[in-house]
Image (cartoon, rainbow, N blue to C red):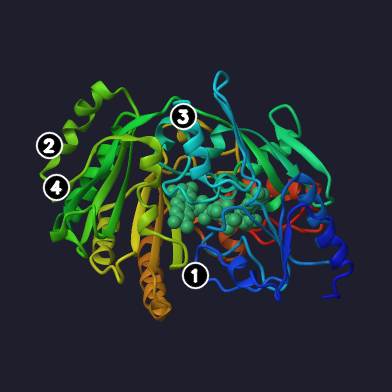
Amino acid sequence: MPANNNVGAFKASLHGELIQPNDAGYDEARKIYNGMIDKRPRMIAYCADVEDVQRAVRFGRENEMLTAIRGGGHNGGGLGLCDDGLVVDLSKMNDVAIDSEARTVRVGGGCTWNDVDTATHEHGLAVPAGTISTTGVAGLTLGGGVGHLTRKYGLTIDNLLAADLVLADGSTVTASAEDNEELYWAIRGGGGNFGVVTSFVFRAHPVHTNYAGPTLWELDQAAEVLSWYREFILKAPEELGGFFAFLVVPGPPFPEHLHGKAMCGVVWCYTGPMEKAEEVFKPIREFGPPAFEHVGPMPHPMMQSMFDVFYPPGLQWYWRADFVNEISDQAIAEHVRFGSDIPTGHSTMHMYPIDGAAHRISNSETPWAYRESNWAQVIVGVDPNPANKGKIIDWTKSYFDALHPHSAGGAYVNFMMDEGQERVKATYRDNYARLARIKKRYDPDNFFRVNQNIEPAG
Ligand SMILES: Cc1cc2nc3c(=O)[nH]c(=O)nc-3n(C[C@H](O)[C@H](O)[C@H](O)COP(=O)(O)OP(=O)(O)OC[C@H]3O[C@@H](n4cnc5c(N)ncnc54)[C@H](O)[C@@H]3O)c2cc1C
């Protein structure tokens, strides 16, 4: 790699800040959410505005630097960071502007979902997002976006109306249904392959207070719960979200007698009329007495941030994922086997329903190529202690190997680590060739390649 030219001039030209290995803040600046990732970039450009992003992209190109884009820094595989290259950090670009009449929200490319949820809530609105509020808007959106509101309002990409990007040549474009339609298609699931998104425009929905929270059952009921859940959730009103989980009960606010206990459960989020909530939850309560239930009216931002406290930044994370069409009896048996053997207190398995509104869009309308699947499944080994790295990796891999034969084939890109081209292709299926053509048009040299990479072709 050639020596960098004009670093001083680049640094002086930025409205934001440039951090290099000798700077005091370097070790803090190179931290990302997953403590297992330890990359050492040559420089991190904290961009203050679109011009800074353009300067950074041009500088990276001119100096032939491996260049990563960092939004919220939550990516499991650490794809917001790179070794010995340039990181274009968007975290200072975190403005949120709401048009409450049009029910649209313009969001800076470096926002976290907490920035968005807090701002939209004041207007009684919400954008479908994930289940943890510290996650970056950019990475989550560009990969798809699965969360509590998916069944009612679709994936996050199904609510993306437009985006402004800085392309690999440093120019700016808007992608929407009216402008650069191919690019607009590609960014709704194709990740950060096509440019740096400096702002997004989303459709928001009237969501203010949910009827929500977890229901937990004993592990020896797990097979029965899963057998009931697989039927129930797909027939439930779309206003009801509910992801199944194996987990170890953390501390307060959970009751003391459950602390440290491995259990299974469903985290519910009902967004329909409050007067109908009891009726919707009746069959859940009739299924059988849970060991614990904490379901009731809850403001949407509280729901979105409920798990933040249990998963602070810096833990060790190891991820494996699949799309799932049906949960067979054999799959349930494997789930129970591994769910009963959770290696550490933070490790977990989630099955997020992706039916309802997400099913009403075809596989070719966006790059998300598993619209017929009913769940996005993710197994995550998590622990604060690096000494337990081997243990969480072993459990995650073994669990994945046992379940993968019962899956649909590909996985949600945002739940994957760096797993190679075959896995990326399996995920985009027939849409990969179109993505590769669009990549060739907008980024022919594969400048943006620190991601679930689409290789330019066609
Ligand atoms: C605790 C936790 C909970 C999660 N829960 C959910 C969930 O409920 N639902 C869900 O869908 N996902 C969830 N995820 C996965 C999440 O969607 C991904 O980790 C996602 O990559 C995070 O986005 P980020 O901006 O924080 O990531 P980063 O690490 O900053 O970036 C991830 C990728 O996006 C690209 N990128 C980032 N910013 C930009 C930009 N401005 N322009 C272009 N490309 C960009 C990067 O190149 C990189 O490849 C969760 C992750 C964690 C760690």
Q: Earlier in the sequence, mark 3 or mark 2?
A: 3
Q: Is residue 55 left or right of residue 99?
A: right
Q: Residue at x 84, y 59 (%)?
A: 12
Q: CA distance from mark 3 to mark 2?
A: 36 Å
Farthest residue to the top: give it: 101
Q: Quadrant of the N terminus?
A: bottom right
Vertical arrangement, residue 119 with respect to residue 72, above or below: above
Amino acid at pointer 1: Gly
The numbered dot on residue 35 is 1
**Helix, strand, or loop for circle 2?**
helix
Vertical arrangement, residue 152 with respect to residue 67, above or below: above
Q: CA distance from mark 1 to mark 4?
A: 35 Å
Residue carrying label 3: 122
Q: Residue at x 38, y 36 (%)?
A: 300
Q: Earlier in the sequence, mark 1 or mark 4?
A: 1
Return the residue nearer the eye: 345 or 219. Answer: 345
Q: Is residue 174 left or right of residue 235?
A: right
**Helix, strand, or loop for circle 4?**
loop
- Residue 285 sits in which quadrant? top left
Amino acid at pointer 4: Pro
Residue 211 position, x and y percent, is 28, 33
* Labelled pair 2, 1 in contact (Cβ < 8 Å): no
The numbered dot on residue 286 is 2
Residue carrying label 4: 290
Q: CA distance from mark 4 to mark 2?
A: 10 Å
Within 10 Å of the Cα at label 4, are there few (<14), some (14-19), or many (20+) other Cα atoms? Answer: some
Mark 4 vs mark 3: in front: 3
Can the viewer see residue 413 in this picture?
Answer: no
**Helix, strand, or loop for circle 3?**
loop
